[in-house]
Amino acid sequence: MSQFSYSDEALVPFCDVLFTPGDLDLLTAGAFGKPVYAMARESRRRQALRACRERHPDEHGMETPAVA
């Protein structure tokens, strides 16, 4: 199991700033062959940061694919 130096709660303000730009594309497949959005939905770790990543497309009017 990974050890994190900072809690999710400490990182959420940075996540909010990072995901503020409307042109940040979380829906295009990246280095791991999946979109960041899909990887966030599948992750069970770092729930507060996951929620931040999941909110971004909706806040910027991007249509999100259904992820099982």
Image (cartoon, grey):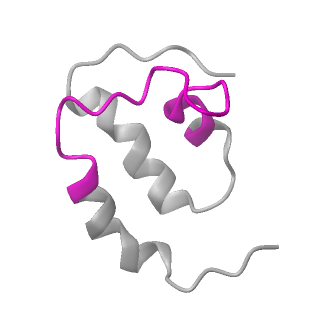
| Main secondary structure of the magenta stretch | loop
The extreme right residue here reads 1
Which quarter of the image is occupied by the C terminus?
A: top right
Camera-nearest residue between 20 and 66: 20
Q: Is residue 29 magenta?
A: yes
Q: How many marks?
A: 0
Place of residue 21 in the rendered image (x, y in percent of width and height, measured from the top left): 17, 40
Q: Is residue 40 above or below residue 12?
A: above
Which quarter of the image is occupied by the N terminus?
A: bottom right
Q: Is residue 12 above or below residue 21?
A: below
Q: Is residue 17 above or below residue 54?
A: below
Residue at the spot x=54%, y=27% of the render?
Answer: 35
Q: Is residue 44 above or below residue 7?
A: above
Place of residue 8 in the rendered image (x, y in percent of width and height, measured from the top left): 47, 72
For residue 31, side relative to residue 1 (left or right)? left
The extreme bottom residue here reads 5
Residue at the spot x=34%, y=28% of the render?
Answer: 25
Q: Is residue 39 magenta?
A: yes
Place of residue 52 in the rendered image (x, y in percent of width and height, measured from the top left): 38, 50
For residue 3, side relative to residue 52 (left or right)? right
Q: Toward which corner of the image does residue 62 lie, by quadrant? A: top left
For residue 52, side relative to residue 23 (left or right)? right
Place of residue 7 in the rendered image (x, y in percent of width and height, measured from the top left): 50, 80
Q: Toward which corner of the image does residue 40 lie, by quadrant? A: top right
Camera-nearest residue between 27 and 41: 27
Residue at the spot x=27%, y=47% of the render?
Answer: 19
For residue 18, side relative to residue 40 (left or right)? left
Give the magenta-colored segment's residue range: 17-40
